[in-house]
Amino acid sequence: MSKSYDNIIIGSGITGLTIAKLLNNKNEDYLIIDKNNSVGGKLSTENHLGYELDCGFQILLEDYPNLKIFPEIYNLESKRLSSGFITIKQENFYKILNPFKNIKGLSPANTFPGFTLKDKYLLLKLILLNKKYKNKKIPVKDFLKNFGFSHTFIKNFFVSFFQGVFLSKGLNVPLKYFLFIFSLFSKSNVSIPINGIGQIAKNIASLLDSSKIIFNKEIINIGINSIKTKDGDNFNFKNLYCTDPKIEKLINKELNQEFFKDITYNGTQCFYFISDMVDINEDFIYLFPDSNNITNIYFKKASQNKLLVSVSSLSMEVSKNTIEKEILGYFSSMKNIRFLNSYKIPDALPSNPKFFNFQEKSFYKYNNNIYFAGDYLSSPCLDGAIQSGINLVESLRK
């Protein structure tokens, strides 16, 4: 038996939910099909042994411009982080405050080894004038060097901080995107939903018609106007919206362009541990510029006596035992540490510069009725995923 819909969306991540919401606002027929058992895609949280674990550590920049189409997100119960970070240098921890958000950040004591007065001046200059440089076509590291930052400060601040954002020590993103994210971190509030990053997608989906989202439905073939699933169902469509480039592999050979065959990703591993409570600061993310294994650590109070430890790594090979040993090297007072779970995400963020803000549209019209949209065609962040969906739906009106 076949069912027909004007619009079918494959994937219930943030791009799919954006498309669904905008189609719903226009009173247009749609159906979301997802192979998973819940909404969210990369914005997912798993309950493991009673702990809410994000499948990859993520934070929310509250001033993302495109969040305005989802005002319901701001109703989430969230933990707002302090604007700044804690870094370790020469076996000592240094708390660095953002002077744009905290007057104490102007103090001479707001520093770490290698963070000079010149660097502070240049940071303020870059924050104030970053829009002036956004159209330059130059690698990020070269731009920072030409701007006057020392090699040491680029490594200890820019690489250390933003490797956790871009999942790359090379800062290999377009300068315009780097400056956009840099500006947001300098001015925006940063928060983490109390019950996990997956609450963002669940909150958005709660305002959609649940009967228009089908879970646990794996697609095995896409034709010119029809979809076939693994369990034998067929769905006909007038328009199809694909939110993951891997979906292209399911398109019939006569239609398949192999357009995304060269797409690449940056990956990450996220490890979770539980330990006895120690004297740490839950308001900041900890950075480790000299570590080959740990990018950042975030601590969350799990109970009166227990601490949830989230550790992010750019290494896809490092083991939990190596991570645990390194944690204890930094926090020797931590007792009764116990491994909970880990998540390996090889395709966490798209990394192909040629697909960034693709054709100034951030989506791709594959043929007359098949479209691709997502952060991989826009910018690799929540805001980019939303922008891609917005641009696609707006194009349908033309």
Image (cartoon, rainbow, N blue to C red):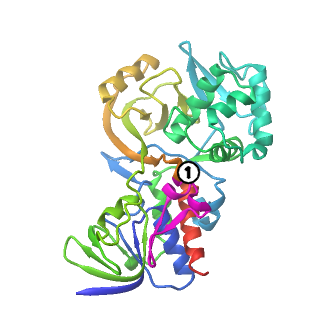
Is residue 73 toward the left or the right of residue 37 in the image? right
Residue located 30% across and 86% down the image? 3
In the depicted view, which residue is nearer to us: 85 or 303? 85
Magenta-colored span: 355-380
Three-letter code, disc 1: Ser
Q: Is residue 170 visible?
A: yes
In the depicted view, which residue is nearer to us: 268 or 301? 268
Name of the residue lying farthest toward the left: 231
Residue 365 on the magenta segment: yes
What quarter of the picture does the C terminus occupy?
bottom right
Name of the residue lying farthest toward the top: 90
What quarter of the picture does the N terminus occupy?
bottom left
Q: How many labels does the image show?
A: 1
Is residue 182 toward the left or the right of residue 364 in the image? right
Residue located 35% across and 87% down the image? 4
Above or below, comparing residue 204 to residue 162 in the picture: below
Position of residue 168 measured from the top left corner of the image (x, y, whole percent)? 50, 36
Above or below, comparing residue 224 to residue 279 in the picture: below
Position of residue 152 measured from the top left corner of the image (x, y, whole percent)? 63, 19
Query: Local crowd at mark 1 within 10 Å, few (<14), some, or many (≥20)?
Result: some
Position of residue 379 measured from the top left corner of the image (x, y, whole percent)? 56, 53
Name the residue beneath numbered marker 1: 78
Residue 387 on the magenta segment: no
Residue located 35% across and 81% down the image? 225
